């Protein structure tokens, strides 16, 4: 009986620790996921004024091929590995039944991966929701995701993600 009473006495402390732990997530913006020395604009500079190129110009195709390769291999910020973070973004569902989403890509802008070429790998985050209880109403919902970030890549049919995020919470963006 004493052990049970002791556990009851400690329970508020555990709850307090859990809420403190949740508050310690570092709020990130998308630029924080890009290493300082990552400069894809250098590719663009070698082609001069790209505004003068049309879609049928062979140089346009060459630029796009180089950018796609660079985007897929975009470096990540290794120091973020294992950090508890909170990141806003748009949802691109990968796994779910139309009501519950358990896996998705988090991207920085609307339409990424579907209507336009995917963003660089370091601007795409694969999110796993262990309980499958993400508060997502539809594709491209804007959400806040809180959890532990990994600097590990993930490939899907839609895009390559440079990061993975084990979500503790997915909440509507407000």
Image (spheres, rainbow, N blue to C red):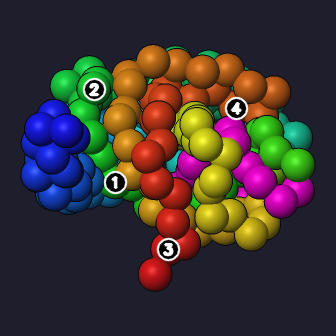
Mark 2 crowdedness (10 Å alpha carbons): few <14, some 14-19, many ≥20? some
**In percent of the image, x 34 and y 54: which residue is there?**
86
The picture places residue 156, in percent across and down from the top left corner, at: 74, 25
Mark 4 crowdedness (10 Å alpha carbons): few <14, some 14-19, many ≥20? many
The mark nearer the N terminus, 4 or 3, is 4
Residue 108: say if magenta.
yes
Residue 23: say if magenta.
no
Query: What residue span does the magenta drawing correspond to?
Result: 98-112
The residue to which callout 4 is attached is 159
Q: From what the image shows, is residue 59 above or below residue 87?
A: above
Circle number at residue 82: 2
Residue 50 in view, yes or no: no
Single out the mark in the foreground, 4 or 1. Answer: 1
The picture places residue 80, in percent across and down from the top left corner, at: 25, 31
8 left or right of 152?
left
* Marks 1 & 2, CB-CB < 8 Å contact: no
**In percent of the image, x 57 and y 50: which residue is there?**
107
Single out the mark in the foreground, 2 or 4. Answer: 2
The mark nearer the N terminus, 2 or 4, is 2
The residue to which callout 3 is attached is 173
The picture places residue 111, in percent across and down from the top left corner, at: 73, 59
């Amino acid at each position: 009986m004493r052990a049970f009473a002791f556990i009851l006495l400690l329970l508020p402390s555990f709850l307090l620790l859990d809420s403190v732990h949740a508050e310690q997530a570092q709020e990130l913006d998308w630029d924080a996921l890009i290493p300082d020395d990552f400069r894809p604009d250098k590719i663009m500079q070698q082609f001069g004024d790209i505004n003068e190129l049309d879609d049928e110009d062979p140089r346009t195709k060459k630029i796009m091929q180089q950018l796609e390769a660079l985007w897929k291999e975009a470096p990540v910020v290794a120091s973020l590995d294992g950090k508890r973070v909170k990141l806003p973004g748009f949802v691109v569902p990968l796994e779910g039944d139309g009501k519950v989403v358990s896996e998705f890509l988090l991207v920085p802008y609307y339409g990424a991966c579907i209507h336009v070429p995917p963003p660089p790998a370091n601007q795409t985050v694969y999110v796993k929701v262990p309980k499958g209880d993400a508060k997502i109403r539809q594709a491209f919902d804007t959400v806040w995701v809180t959890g532990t970030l990994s600097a590990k890549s993930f490939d899907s049919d839609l895009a390559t993600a440079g990061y993975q995020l084990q979500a503790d919470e997915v909440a509507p963006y407000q």
